[in-house]
Image (cartoon, coloured by chain):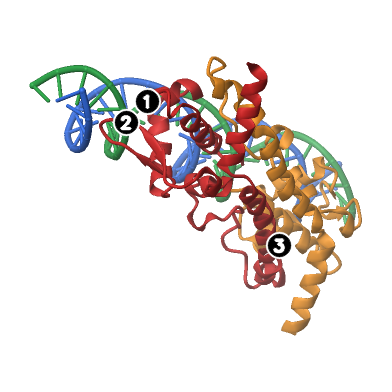
Chain colours: A orange, B red, C green, D blue
Amino acid sequence: MQISSRFTVALHIFACVDTFKDTHKVTSDFLAASINTNPVIIRKILSQLKHAGLINVARGTGGISFTRELKEITFYDVYRAIEPVENGELFHFHESPNPACPVGRNIHALLDGKLVSIQTAMENEMKKYTLQDIHADLQGLLAQQD
Amino acid sequence: MQISSRFTVALHIFACVDTFKDTHKVTSDFLAASINTNPVIIRKILSQLKHAGLINVARGTGGISFTRELKEITFYDVYRAIEPVENGELFHFHESPNPACPVGRNIHALLDGKLVSIQTAMENEMKKYTLQDIHADLQGLLAQQD
DNA sequence: TCAATTGTAACTGTTATGGTTGCATCTCAC
DNA sequence: GTGAGATGCAACCATAACAGTTACAATTGA
């Protein structure tokens, strides 16, 4: 299975807030227009990001602000905020291997460490990228396009 | 989302075939008993592994054999054999960002390379492990348990 | 020929996703 | 205060993937 589009949508949200925060009121409707989806989808994701402590959302008046500097928010922070799986396990292990079988009895011991190392490799790469990287890269792209 | 349990089931299948190929006829029923699932689930996964060229399955008589040495089959080979997503993209990007928005127009250019590097980090770690590692580790565990 | 086995279609129940409507609640400007 | 504009959230819907199950045709070797 794929990691849901909520992840890229969340990164898109951050890029929009960063880009437009001084020139527009960035609402869920505004974001939905840039991302081309429904405002309620945006609000659900904003709610997740808020509960993870990454942003503040102003009720009533609208508007989004970051709780930390951009370089202090990594892709991994966003991924964990958005991903609903309890304790964040990347692999779904089959539930009940047969303990009467020598393989079934040992399959977890055989695989668990390897699966963790694979997941960790992905997560460590996610931690290398921050919202500051998006900010910088976008500035570069926009400068070319002027 | 999580990577489906078909992946760990497939690795379990390989471990069973390797362990029991000389002492038992390893059928889908036999495997289903060790994995504690339905024989048809097993046959579906065997079919995927067969189409990926990793195993041969004997119709009628039953029995499974490897097409390569264990050390020549990596976790990544198994993952790609089992994962149905076309061209194997780990991330599901939202479909149609708004080209009229400076962010929407550039979001793919901003993120694609970073997402690929994350996926590649995971896949490279998967390529480090082979079925030979499972074989060796299981021999070690079983030796302890005697 | 027969028993055992694979291959596969058809179906079920559950869950996640993405989308949508509707509305209560909140906030600020007036 | 009132109203306009927002968010928060519940309640749906359609679709798809997953895991499981039944049934049966096709294959193979004894």
- Dot placed on the residue nearer the N-terminal end, 2 or 1: 1
- Spatial CA span between label 1 and label 3: 47 Å
Q: Which residue is mark 1?
A: B25
What amino acid does circle 3 point to?
A: Lys
Disc 2 and disc 3 on one polypeptide chain: yes
* For marks 2 and 3 on the same chain, the one whose residue lies earlier in the sequence: 2
x and y, in percent, of residue A108 in the image: 63, 27
Query: In the image, what residue type sits under mark 2?
Result: Gly
Q: Chain of mark 3?
A: B
B89 horizontally vs B27: left or right:
right
Total number of numbered labels? 3
Q: Earlier in the sequence, mark 1 or mark 3?
A: 1
Locate residue A119, reporting x and y percent. Answer: 70, 44
The answer to whether residue B48 is left or right of residue A60 is left
- Cα separation between marks 2 and 1: 8 Å
Q: What residue does disc 3 label?
A: B114
C23 or A110: nearer the viewer = A110
Chain letter, disc 2 residue: B
Label 1, secondary structure: give it.
loop
Q: Are marks 2 and 1 on the same chain?
A: yes
| Labels 1 and 3 touching (C-beta < 8 A) | no
Does residue A20 appear in this view?
Answer: no
